[in-house]
Amino acid sequence: MPNEQVKLIDFRQEGASNLLFPKPAILSSNNANWTNIHFEYHQQPGHDITSSHTMHVIVTALSSTTVERWIDGCFQKEFLNKGDTAVIPASTLHRSTWRQQIQFMFVAFEPTLMRQVGQELVNPDCIELIPHFATVQDPLIQGILLNLKEELVSGGIGGRLYVDQLKTTLALHLLRKYCTCTPRIATYSDGLPKYKLQQALEYINAHLEQDIQLADLAELLGMSRYYFVRLFKQSMGVTPYQYVLQQRVERAKVLLRHRERAISDIALECGFANQSHFTKHFRQFTGRTPKAYQNR
């Protein structure tokens, strides 16, 4: 790889990608209040970048083009198709060159995220993400990134619990497929112990109007986020995010019976981001809009 000055990029800093690309991101999670993870969507003209990152970076192409890429001194010419994904671990020297306009999205996340998710699965000292050129497609990674993109486009209607579940799934997938050691996934048939399940349900119902976080629920029960999601779903038949939505809709039903209440006020009191978010999920669970339910 040619000798060039290497930019150290920290995507926790607002506008960090402006040091890399000639045009600003079309979409960014800078103001989304996400933790340990950062997303951007780009459309860039032909360009050449050389950098190293403080965070792990996963890049997925959204258009077809040719890219010359160096990762840690290894070179490969890539003929990208939509969905092709590259994995660039933190502190890895990376250079890429393309001559045509390109569309892509990427997610950057703290290395600590994989250690937090994998704490009960592998020895944290052996968690090492392996670099991968963009030569294969990974539908799960592509789907997670597209869901993060949609979450930003929608104005964050899913909330941090939804994003927490996406990033936990991403970290576990990377541990399984892109790391030097394979996690040992324990199997459970009974879900959460009854007293732990009761703790989780009581916490959720006491904080429905707040932005509930997966990390808080897992910490409350003294387990990793991965095992909490897995065991909660075994116990309840739905993920924590889906359960929270169900309970918010059930609380809204009670409040909607009092017709003097404004629907916008009920939406906020039940923990929905706005009235549009409330209407979408209320109709999804009941088949009716909040207004139709209120006037029945």
Image (cartoon, rainbow, N blue to C red):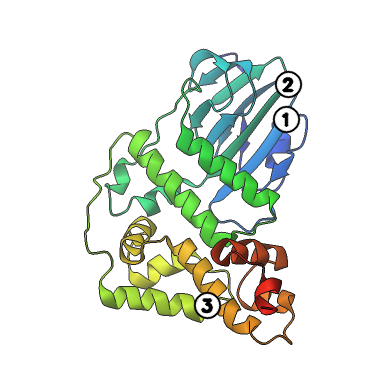
* Residue 130 found in image quarter: top left
Picture disc at residue 207:
3
**Position of residue 290 measured from the top left corner of the image (x, y, whole percent):** 67, 72
Kindly identify the residue that appears in the image at 59 percent across and 37 percent down.
Answer: 106
Mark earlier in primary sequence (2, 3): 2
**Amino acid found under the numbered disc labelled 1:** Gln
Q: Secondary structure at mark 3?
A: loop
Kindly identify the residue that appears in the image at 67 percent across and 67 percent down.
Answer: 289
Q: Secondary structure at mark 2?
A: loop
**Position of residue 129 measured from the top left corner of the image (x, y, whole percent):** 40, 35
Mark 1, residue position:
43
Q: CA distance from mark 2 to mark 3?
A: 46 Å
Picture disc at residue 101:
2
Kindly identify the residue that appears in the image at 70 percent across and 79 percent down.
Answer: 295
Q: CA distance from mark 3 to mark 1?
A: 40 Å
Kindly identify the residue that appears in the image at 53 percent across and 57 percent down.
Answer: 162
**Position of residue 136 measured from the top left corner of the image (x, y, whole percent):** 46, 23
Mark earlier in primary sequence (3, 1): 1
Closer to the camera, 27 or 124?
Answer: 27
Q: Secondary structure at mark 1?
A: strand
Looking at the figure, which quarter contains the C terminus? bottom right
Tell me whether circle 2 and circle 1 mark residues in contact (CB < 8 Å): yes
**Amino acid found under the numbered disc labelled 2:** Gln
* Residue 202 found in image quarter: bottom left
